[in-house]
Amino acid sequence: MANKPEKPTENTMEEKEEKEKKESFGLHLDLLMDSMEETRFKKKYSELIEKLVHETHFNDVEVESLLIIYYKLAKENMKTEKYKEKSVTKEQFRDFLHCALDMTDDTLMDRIFVSLDRMPGSTITMETYAHALSLMLRGTLEEKINFCFRVNNAQIRVYDTMGDGLLGRDAMFYLLRNSLVSLSGEDDAEESVKDMIEVITKKLDVDRDGKISFQDYKQTVLKQPALLEVFGQCLPSRGAVYTFSTTFSSNPNLKM
């Protein structure tokens, strides 16, 4: 008797839907611009492209490709009366990070957006977009450390929820509260998070004052880069970076 095909599990169905969403996202963008419009775009933004080459970790071809992606996303907004100019909304960029770079931590996503763009309004500029991707895809370890934690000229960073350059136990609990799930109940999960905080504090608290300062964090992460996102994912994984980078770059040195 032939075996009946197994019924897809819920996780399998979710993974399939996620894959289809990403594929349709890229295909849809490819249909939004023809070669003539692309040529006009490159000519119109040639000065900005040159400027961003000097300000980011991308070469001219890569900047062009990334700005074309921005332009294609922005064209979607021209279908509504709300956006008369071609610009990408923060909601669109959030979807882009989700689909293209597998950044799905909703707990930290709002913090990430505040850190990337403190300008008022519902859209982000081409420059903000390019600088954000430069950090996420090619940023140095020190740039990523500063993005995750450091307070500089009153700029908010992802982990520093209070903006004072220190992480106390309450702040750490806030960041880690959704990182563990216990089958025994919420109380057990809370205790597990507290135990995790004890371990992290021992690892990162260099000056032993009971709090994690920026210097504590930086000194530890420079020695152990794996601890960069110890308080939650705020950067794309290496695999996601590699996969997305191959869509716009021919750099033979790209490695996972």
Image (cartoon, helix red, strand yellow):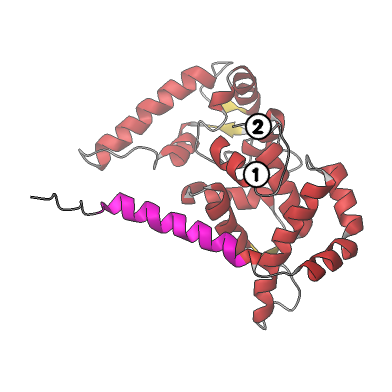
- Residue at figure coordinates x 68%, y 29% from the top left: 141
100 and 143: which one is in front?
Answer: 100
Residues under labels 2 and 1: Cα distance? 25 Å
The crowd level at tag 2 (other Cα within 10 Å; few <14, some 14-19, many 20+) is many
Please, which residue is most extreme toward the front here? 1
Q: Is residue 12 rendered to the left or right of residue 138?
A: left
Side (left or right) of 112 relative to 6: right
Residue 120 is at least partly visible in this image? no
Provide the residue designation for mark 1: 246
Q: Name the disc covering residue 254, or none.
A: none
Q: Can residue 148 be seen in this view?
A: yes
For the residue pair 170 and 144, the one nearer the viewer reads as: 144
Q: Where is residue 193 in the image (x, y as percent from the top left)?
A: 36, 33
Quarter occupied by residue 177: top left
In this view of the protein, which residue sits in the foreground, 155 or 145?
Answer: 145
In this picture, residue 41 sits left or right of residue 191: right
Residue in the image at 82% along x and 43% along y: 59
Q: Mark 2 points at which residue?
A: 145
Residue 13 among magenta residues: yes
Q: What residue type is labelled 2?
A: Ile
Say if the magenta span includes residue 84. Answer: no
**Residue 144: percent from the left, percent from the top?**
66, 34
User: Which residues, given as a range, are shown in magenta?
Assistant: 8-28
The three-letter code of the residue at mark 1 reads Thr
CB within 8 Å, label 2 to label 1: no
Q: In which quarter of the image is the C terminus?
A: top right
